[in-house]
Amino acid sequence: MGAAARRFLKPNPAAPPIDVRVVIPARNEVDNVAACVHACRRQAAEVVVVDDASTDGTGAAARAAGATDVIRLDADPPMGWTGKARACQAGASGAATTWLAFVDADVVLHPHALATMAEATTHTSTSIVGGLECRSFWERLLLPEMGLALVQEGLPADFASGQCFLVRRDHYESVGGHGHATVRGSLVEDRDLAAALGGHDARLAPKLLRTRMYRTGADLRRGLLKNQAALHRRPAAHLAALLAPVASRRPWAAVVVSAGGRAAAGQNPLYGVLAPIARMALATLYLESWWRARTGRPVAWKGRDVKATHG
C-alpha cells in the first residue's frame, strides 16, 4: 500500500505545456469520442483520431469535435496485430512532435494532465490510471473492488496503463512503436510497450482523468474475460490475493477496507458490504479468462473475436 501511495499524481497547474500529438484509437466510440477530443485539444498540438472500422459514426463525431485529423481504417487488422496496436501505430505515423500520447476514446483528461505527466517523470514514458465513472450496479460492485485488490496485491514492476500513455516520440520510434514484435499482437500492449521502451513510470492519478470503461454488464464481463489472464500471469498468487481477505477469520475486515477504499476513490462506500461477493465474482471471471486463454476460446469484443492470452 505504501509503494502504491507513492505513485499517486495530482494535477500541477504550473507544469509547462508540452509539444505533443495525441492519438485516440477508436472503434464504435460515438458516445465517447467527442468529449475525449475536446479535452485533448486544450493541451495538444495535434489530436489524431484513428477510426478502426467503426460502424456507428465515430469518425464523423471526431471531426465535428475538432480533431486535427481522422484516419479511417476499413479492413480488419492483419494477422499478428490487435486492432488497438494497429490504430495506435497508424496515428503516430508521421508525427514531428516531441511527445506522443495515446489516449483511450472513453477517457476525459484534466486540462493539465499531459503537462503534469511530463513534468513529473524523468523517464522516456509514463502512464496514468484515472478515476472511474461507475453507473450500473455491476460497475459499482466490481470495478472499484478490482482496483482496490490491485493496490493491495501490489502494483507489479511492469505495470503500465493504456488509458493515457505518454512517450517521447524519438524513443517510441527507436523501438518500432506499436509495431514492436512483443507489442503488436498483445492484449496488454501498454505493459509490453513500456517493457520495450524500458524505465517506464506508471502512476495512479484519479484527478487527472475520468473514464467509464464499460457501459453494460455484458461489456464489463467481456472486457474482463479478454484481458485478466494476460494482466495476472500467476494464477495462484492472484487468486490468493483476491480471496484471502474474505476467507480469513475476520471477513468483516474486508468489508471495512473495501468501504474505506471506495470512499477514498469517490465511490459509494455502501458497496463495501458486498466485498466478498465482488471478490468471488472477480475470481470467477479470472478463472474463465485463464481457461479461455488455455483453450484458445475467443471473446467477442467490439464486433471482433479476440483470443485471451496468458501474457
Image: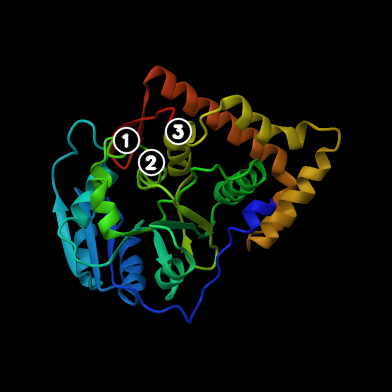
Kindly identify the amino acid type of the residue bearing the numbered disc 1: Thr
Q: x, y (%) of residue 227?
A: 44, 37
> If you read the primary sequence from the N terminus, does the residue marked by circle 2 or circle 3 appear first?
2
What is the C-alpha distance between the residues marked 3 and 1? 13 Å
Binning the other alpha carbons within 10 Å of mark 3 as few (below 14), some (14 to 19) or many (20 upward) gives many
Rendered location of residue 311, percent (x, y): 43, 31
- Give the mark nearest the N terminus, 2 or 1: 1
Q: Do the residues bearing badges 3 and 1 touch, measured as CB atoms within 8 Å?
A: no
Residue at 51% from the left image edge and 60% from the top image edge: 130
Read off the residue under disc 2: 192
Does 298 sit above or below residue 97?
A: above
User: Percent x, y for residue 165?
Assistant: 38, 56
Q: How is the image coloured?
A: rainbow
Question: Depth check: 178 or 309 in front?
Answer: 178
Kind of residue indicated by mark 3:
Ala
The answer for how far apart the CA atoms under marks 2 and 1 are is 6 Å
Residue contact between numbered discs 2 and 1, judged by CB atoms under 8 Å: yes
The type of residue carrying mark 2 is: Asp
Residue 281 visible, this orientation: yes
Q: Is residue 10 above or below residue 268?
A: below
Tell me the tag on residue 182. 1
Position above or below: 301 against 51: above
Q: Position of residue 260 (x, y in %)?
A: 74, 56
Q: Which residue appears at 45% of the width and 78% of the height?
A: 15
Q: Residue at x 36, y 78 (%)?
A: 17
> How busy is the neighbourhood of tag 2: few (under 14 within 10 Å), some, or many (20 plus)?
many
Residue located beneath label 3 in the image: 230
